[in-house]
Image (cartoon, coloured by chain):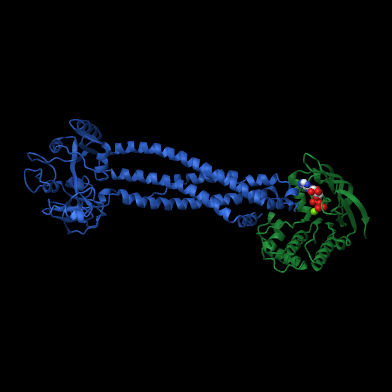
Chain colours: A blue, B green
Amino acid sequence: MMNPLIMVKADYRAMRGSAWAVVLLVAFAVAIGVALSAQEKALRTGTTRAAADFDLVIGAAGSATQLVMTTVYLQPEALPLMPGEILKSLGTDPRVKAFAPIAFGDVVRGYPVIGTTPDFVTRWGRYDAPMQGRFFSGENEAVIGHDVAMQLGEEIIPAHGLGSDNSAKGAPSALEASHRHETTRLRVVGRLPATGSPWDKAILVPIESVWETHGFGNGHRQDGRIGAPFDAETVPPLPAIVVKPHRIADAYALRSDHRKNGLMALFPAEILVSLYRNLGDVRDAMLVASILNGVLILGAVILLIVALFSLRRRSYALLRALGASALYSGAVAWLGAFGLIAVGCLAGLALGWVLTAALSLWLSTQTGLDLHLSPDWTQTLPALLLLLAGSLFAGLPAVMAYRLSLHEALRGE
Amino acid sequence: MGLSGQITALRLDVTQPDASPLRILDLPHLALDAGEVIGISGPSGSGKTSLLHCLAGLMRPTSGAILWNERDIAALPTDACDLWRREHVALVFQDFQLIPELSVMENMALPQFFSQWRLTDTQKDSLHKQGLQLGLNNLHQRASSLSRGEQQRVAVARSLWHQPDLILADEPTASLDRVHADKVMQALLEHARQHRTTLIVASHDPAVLGLMDRVIGLENGRTATGQAVS
Ligand SMILES: Nc1ncnc2c1ncn2[C@@H]1O[C@H](COP(=O)(O)OP(=O)(O)O)[C@@H](O)[C@H]1O
Ligand SMILES: [Mg+2]
């Protein structure tokens, strides 16, 4: 069997730095393609997973995106309030399986304190028990999200949330200390399982506790009760309600019922879909850009290969002068070029994954979303395409070797 | 076949393929018998290299024929011509034409890799012997690290080792001192005698030309003198 590798070795040795240039060029092109598509997918699944328990969200009329961002992703923004009486009507609505008011505003050591009900803390009964300890059972108790750096049994004092406070989560802050609601003391009694959402870095307390802290009463006729039904004469106002309808038809009916009288109702999943649609346009543009990128890289690689070939034309002429078959010199040229592109593609895939992992880590800390990467063969597609196109052009030097005038290439002087 | 190695150039004519056609070679007739040892002499630019390349099929004559055992090499398709060269011809190029990035041994045995994955121990032994005959002791050195004289000897060793029927040596002693030049000529002649190989040596060196059966003088691509030296 013929051994073209000995000449490939010689070619690589002769090329030295230029060989690395080809490899790096291909590697970067592939890495960028992989990173973009992997990141997009991770973001999509991460955001969808985070919205899982939010079937229908009701709020005061305003920005739909803002309502979703604040309730599902806990992006701190002041939402307009709606009258608490809606809680009464939802409580008697046969289409509603369960519902939970949500209140925001306070913080402890940078973690948002969220007022809600046992129904939502158990994620509509999906959790029988927390990961550690127990669920809250009174106004002075709190459960913490999976990633909150606190101990069970710890006593915490909520402080009025301040948008300007940029201290890191988990760190005590002077600003926070000066805004504490000193009369409210909460004990951490449980830790929730991970949801892969920003709720993992939140402190959940009975909504009654939030209302009382701010002097609204507790929403019940009887003191000491927590959760639905809310039967007080006047139920305090609140920014958002998450509703679990019985059936899909109920969900649509409830949504249209709560779209009037200064209210707004929406399906977060639907908002995400429209968001993805916009992202989809971006993705299409990115696809075109990355194809263009690939074509440019391929062009550059071909030029480089051709230029390198002209530098090596004497050795190809020599091969033919020594009687090498077209198959042999073709194999040398093809393997040489293909080897560089293939190594570049492999390095690019590896680099792409590292890049994606790093980007995910950064995005996770920024958004609180769990953006773990799932290997996906479609992400190797740009690399495979480049390899395929490369392998077509890799034969170019062999064709050129055939058009050489051996006499001129080897005449000397 | 007793015919092996017989080469004839008939009405060999090469012109430069330019706007102003310059005649490079214009030979009426040249016939060599198998095992014959021929010298080509002439000042530089007289067409020695062109003639050797023509005979090796590296350059097609504009008109005329090159007969190898009655087969016209000049009329062969490229592939067939390359294959014929692989089977019968070895060139010692004026500029040696080694692959600098390969070792001496890899350079000497290069054509072997066209059909073989690795060299056998027997082949390596014979490569070492061939090297030693020309004063090359270390075959594992890169060709790029050699002096010009050593490179020239590697080029000669490569042509000899493959045991061709026709050796075309283009000024094979130009970069060598007397001692090594003698070694090279001795090796070439010995090989020609032993294997009935046709040997054509282009050279200016009277000492080299003196060893030839016959010397053809070239001048501006034409035969100047056809002196027989025995
Ligand atoms: N491919 C070519 N293009 C232009 N001129 C050439 C070419 N080949 C040979 N010549 C010319 O032909 C003549 C003979 O050259 P060459 O065969 O190299 O002579 P020598 O080997 O005797 O020095 C020179 O004048 C040279 O310039
Ligand atoms: Mg010459």
Which quadrant would residue A88 be assigned to in this image? Answer: top left
Please tell me which residue lies in front, A151 or A66: A66
Residue A388 position in % (x across, y down): 55, 44
Residue A217 position in % (x across, y down): 9, 45
Q: Is residue B134 visible?
A: yes
Residue A116 position in % (x across, y down): 18, 46
Which quadrant would residue B216 be assigned to in this image? Answer: bottom right
Q: Is residue A53 visible?
A: no
Which quadrant would residue B10 be assigned to in this image? Answer: top right
Q: Residue at x 52, y 52 (%)?
A: A24
Please tell me which residue lies in front, A281 or A116: A281
Left or right: A402 in relation to A63: right
From what the image shows, is residue B224 above or below residue A278? Answer: below
Left or right: A220 in relation to A327: left
Task: Count the numbered circles shown.
Answer: 0
Left or right: A396 in relation to B207: left
Please tell me which residue lies in front, B32 or A130: B32
Residue A20 position in % (x across, y down): 55, 54
- Which image quarter is the N terminus of chain A in? bottom right
